[in-house]
Image (cartoon, rainbow, N blue to C red):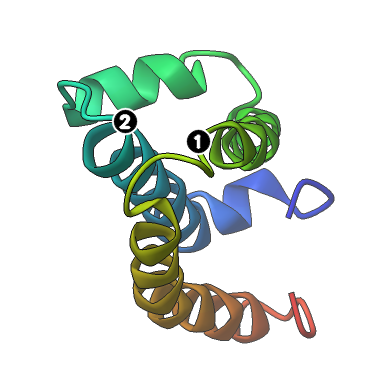
Amino acid sequence: MRRLDFDRVRSRLLPEVELIVVAEHRALHRDVLGETWSRPSAYRWIRYEHPDPIGQLIAATRRLAGCWSAAAAAPGSAHIRDRFTAEALDHLSRALEIARELGYGDG
């Protein structure tokens, strides 16, 4: 997504990908780690005020992968991650559909 024309992805594709990353943050931080969670806290954690929002989503996804690994021993962690993954597949399919509509092949 980073290689794509930002103006073309900003209105439809970027929000769909944001939704996935924010939902994953919620699943991990609220549901697994038991932290107080809010959408603004997720965006701060993503560091979304950075001038490269796509790069920040990529970095956040990598950090989340590391956090999931660190939280693997937490009770219910695997079940919560599986539930998130199942829910995220719909949004990922939608993001790929939008990318194709914008002329970007298979994502």
Can you say which quadrant of the picture contains the C terminus? bottom right
Using a 10 Å C-alpha cutoff, classify the residue at mark 1 as few (fewer than 14 neighbours), some (14 to 19) or many (20 or more).
Answer: some
Q: Residue drawn 32% across and 54% down?
A: 76
The quarter holding residue 56 reads: top right
| Left or right: 58 in relation to 70 | right
| Left or right: 27 in relation to 51 | left
Give the mark nearer the N terminus: 2 vs 1: 2
How far across and how far down the image is residue 54, in percent? 64, 38
Considering only vertical position in the picture, is 9 above or below 96? Answer: above
Q: Which residue is mark 1?
A: 71
Front residue of 73 and 2 = 73
Considering only vertical position in the picture, is 42 above or below 61? Answer: above
Using a 10 Å C-alpha cutoff, classify the residue at mark 2 as few (fewer than 14 neighbours), some (14 to 19) or many (20 or more).
Answer: some
The quarter holding residue 32 reads: top left
Give the alpha-carbon distance from disc 2 to disc 1, as whole Å.
8 Å
Q: Is residue 94 something one can see in this rendering?
A: yes
Q: Residue drawn 73% across and 51% down?
A: 5
Q: Secondary structure at mark 2?
A: loop
Q: Residue drawn 59% across and 31% down?
A: 70
How far across and how far down the image is residue 49, in percent? 46, 14
| Left or right: 47 in relation to 23 | right
Q: Is residue 48 something one can see in this rendering?
A: no
How far across and how far down the image is residue 48, in percent? 47, 22
What type is the residue that disc 2 sits on?
Leu
Can you say which quadrant of the picture contains the N terminus? bottom right
How many numbered marks have been drawn onto this rendered protein structure? 2
Instruction: Say if mark 2 contacts mark 1, CB within 8 Å.
Output: yes
Q: Residue drawn 49% across and 24% down?
A: 46
What type is the residue that disc 1 sits on?
Ala
Front residue of 89 and 53 = 89
Q: Which residue is mark 2?
A: 33
